[in-house]
Amino acid sequence: DGGITQSPKYLFRKEGQNVTLSCEQNLNHDAMYWYRQDPGQGLRLIYYSQIVNDFQKGDIAEGYSVSREKKESFPLTVTSAQKNPTAFYLCASTLLAGGQNEQFFGPGTRLTVL
Amino acid sequence: SQELEQSPQSLIVQEGKNLTINCTSSKTLYGLYWYKQKYGEGLIFLMMLQKGGEEKSHEKITAKLDEKKQQSSLHITASQPSHAGIYLCGADTYRGTSGSRLTFGEGTQLTVNP
């Protein structure tokens, strides 16, 4: 079955530690995205990538880093510089050709900083 | 003010009742996407609207995009407990990007009481 997987489902981190969230897709989608969701605030874009080895900052990129070494994978690192990292993180992907295309979402990772 | 506003923020209805959720943009909408989310899970794509005046239906859910392409409504007929969840609209307000970057509303929390 094609889809997007995120791991782990739940992640706990101590203050001052970096942590990497995994996102993999087997849909052969071109673009991949990372969003952060806080209660009552909808989704905010952290980073996105439209092609391998290239990515752009979204609205709230500070304290985060990404890489896109393979088309299928777009890991997100939450660094110790992120002041308030506790949140629900969602990964998405989409095709870029053929007009408007919906974004497909993974199941999410809930990160808690202790 | 928010680029994309959803109303209401929350809605509690009795099973069998109809309801409407609105999504209003401060910019022209080149694509408007409706998603549903269960708490703690990923987003499920419902419908996409692109043309002014367009209307789409899936089962008991109907979405419309107004002629001026700055507002969309999502209407549920004869609501059921299975309709409960968070409904989010996502907007493509960048001409020529074909949905490659979306802005999301804050979501509407829907509760359907049996």
Image (tube, coloured by chain):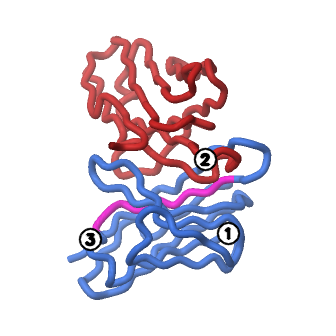
Tell me the chief SS of the magenta region: strand
Q: As drawn, which residue projects farthest toward the bottom? A: A16
Residue under circle 3? A84
Distance between the Cα atoms at labels 3 and 2? Answer: 29 Å
**Residue name at image x 43 percent, y 31 percent:** B24
Identify the colour of chain A in the image: blue
Disc 2, SS = loop
Task: Point out the stretch of residues depicted in magenta.
Answer: A86-94
Judging from the image, mark 2 belongs to the subunit labelled: B
Residue under circle 2? B94
Image spot of residue B110 (x, y percent)? 32, 30
Image spot of residue B29 (x, y percent)? 57, 35
For disc 2, the neighbor class at 10 Å (few under 14, some 14 to 19, many from 20) is: some
How many numbered tags mark residues here? 3
Residue type at numbered disc 2? Tyr
**Residue name at image x 58 percent, y 79 percent:** A67
Give the quadrant of residue B4.
Answer: top left
For disc 1, the neighbor class at 10 Å (few under 14, some 14 to 19, many from 20) is: some
Give the quadrant of residue A36.
Answer: bottom left
Q: In this view, does B77 lie above or below A64?
A: above
Distance between the Cα atoms at labels 2 and 1? Answer: 26 Å
Image spot of residue B101 (x, y percent)? 58, 53
Chain painted in red in the figure: B
Asked if labels 3 and 1 touch by Cβ distance under 8 angstroms, the answer is no
For disc 3, the neighbor class at 10 Å (few under 14, some 14 to 19, many from 20) is: few
- Which one is earlier in the sequence, the residue at label 1 or at label 3? 1
Disc 3, SS = loop
Q: In this view, does B43 lie above or below A109?
A: above
Image spot of residue B1 (x, y percent)? 33, 43
Residue type at numbered disc 1? Glu
Q: Residue A72 carries which label?
A: 1
